[in-house]
Amino acid sequence: MDIQPIAYFRSPFGTKFGIPRQSGLVEKLEGSIVFEPPYRHPEALRGLEDFDYLWLIWEFSANPENGFSPTVRPPRLGGNVRMGVFATRSPFRPNRLGLSSVKIKKIERNTPEGPMIHVAGGDLMDGTPIYDIKPYIKYADSHPDAHSGFAGSRRWNKLEVKIPETFGERFSPEQIQTIAGILELDPRPHYQDDPQRVYGMTFGGEDIRFKVDGDVLTVL
């Protein structure tokens, strides 16, 4: 089967570092789905306004094609424990396909680029190719009592984030809240714990640098 992108994702993340490791973790993080010309038909979105969430099927396009490896090192386990690739959501997969659930914020049917879907809670980099979208259906897609393996057994400890007041000169209050929500999830590789090391991520065209000492992340 030969598949081609039907759309591309627009995100404030120019690189993959800093992107939340799962969709829905930062609800204020917004992005947009822009369709390719053959699929810019408002009729294709008829009825979508009656749904709250979408499934996105997309490609880890920033990852090199290194071939198949049966095991990976999940960040949730500190990057030091190997698990079977099919027991993880690692981006290093045989076909590099990702699956994300995002919240529909607004649907625009007639823009200069055709219909556009604005969503929140995504975990996609800017320019990510999207191969399909499907509505999220609660009775079929939600299993609140399901076991989540190692991912559900590890507590997610959020960091205290300190952002300088000068951020207000470059970002809106809503953007600052979004950035804080991203950073409190600790985007570093979990095996790194050097309080003097400076990390950087791009967001909205800006380069954000920070350090982490213990449970405190300080934006520089």
Image: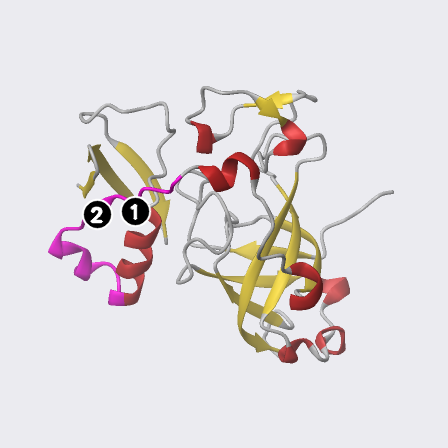
Residue type at mark 2: give it: Val
* Marks 1 and 2 close (CB-CB < 8 Å): yes
Whether residue 109 can be seen here: no
Q: Which mark is residue 161?
A: 2
Q: Tag 2's secondary structure? A: strand
Read off the residue under disc 1. Answer: 184
Establish if 2 lies above or below 81: below
Left or right of 56, for residue 30 = left
* Residue at 38% over, 40% down: 155
Image quadrant for the N terminus? top right
* Residue at 76% over, 78% down: 43
Residue 163 percent location from the top left of the image: 17, 50
Report crowding for label 2: few under 14, some 14 to 19, many 20 or more residues within 10 A (C-alpha).
many
* Magenta-drawn stretch contains 28: no
Front residue of this view, candidates 218 and 107: 218
* Residue at 71% over, 69% down: 40
Residue type at mark 1: give it: Glu
